[in-house]
Image (tube, rainbow, N blue to C red):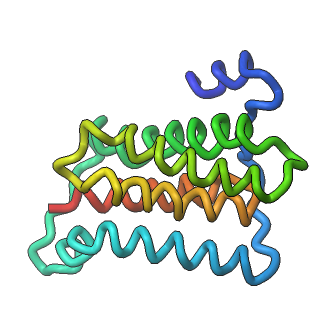
Amino acid sequence: MLLVGTLAFAPQHAAPELTRPEFRGRWAWLAGLLALAAVLWLYRGAIVQAAAPAAIFPPLTPAVISGALFAPLVEEWIFRGVLWRQLAPAGAPPRAAATALLATSIAFGLWHLPFADHAPIHVHALFGAAMGLLRWRTGSIVPGIALHGLGNLLSFVR
């Protein structure tokens, strides 16, 4: 509800790309594979834990719901939606998209400073770059939200 209310007051050019992603061409598919590889690499320890016979999956607590659903939605909307469109509006040259990719990746890494004990800042920036590349090649933030949510959900497995 909060997101819907926020979108109602956001300027039109700041609306996120909550559209159906278009995986047209090899670059879009390559971006998708790269983003999936980034999630698998970043959360490799959690994936191994989840595959273990003694894995403990978290109950659906507010923290899990917030971390796996709300945080990815908001973060992707901010970094690959609003901030991206400020730096590379529709119809901008590819150089603007490359600048947006670099700037939003660095900002995403810095955003995660409080979580530096979870993974180093440069790892978060690289993850942000993978999500940004996926957004650039598909024209949508939806795949990034899904992969980001999956990664955050994996971080709750013990």
Relative height, residue 135 to residue 63 (above, below): below
Rendered location of residue 24, percent (x, y): 81, 75
Q: Residue at x 56, y 45 (%)?
A: 104
Q: Residue at x 26, y 58 (%)?
A: 155
Q: Which residue of the protein is positioned furthest toward the right in this rendering?
A: 91
Could you say which is closer to the camera, residue 14 or residue 22? 14
The count of marks equals 0
Rendered location of residue 38, percent (x, y): 43, 71
Q: Residue at x 76, y 72 (%)?
A: 23
Q: Which residue of the protein is positioned furthest toward the left in this rendering?
A: 54
Left or right of 113? Residue 52 is left
Relative height, residue 27 to residue 127 (above, below): below
Q: Which residue of the protein is positioned furthest toward the bottom in this rendering?
A: 26
Could you say which is closer to the camera, residue 57 or residue 114? 114
Q: In which quarter of the image is the C terminus?
A: bottom left
Q: In which quarter of the image is residue 61?
A: top left
Q: Quadrant of the N terminus?
A: top right
Could you say which is closer to the camera, residue 132 or residue 45? 132
Left or right of 123? Residue 59 is left
Relative height, residue 149 to residue 87 (above, below): below
Q: In which quarter of the image is residue 11?
A: top right
Q: In which quarter of the image is residue 87?
A: top right
Left or right of 137? Residue 122 is left
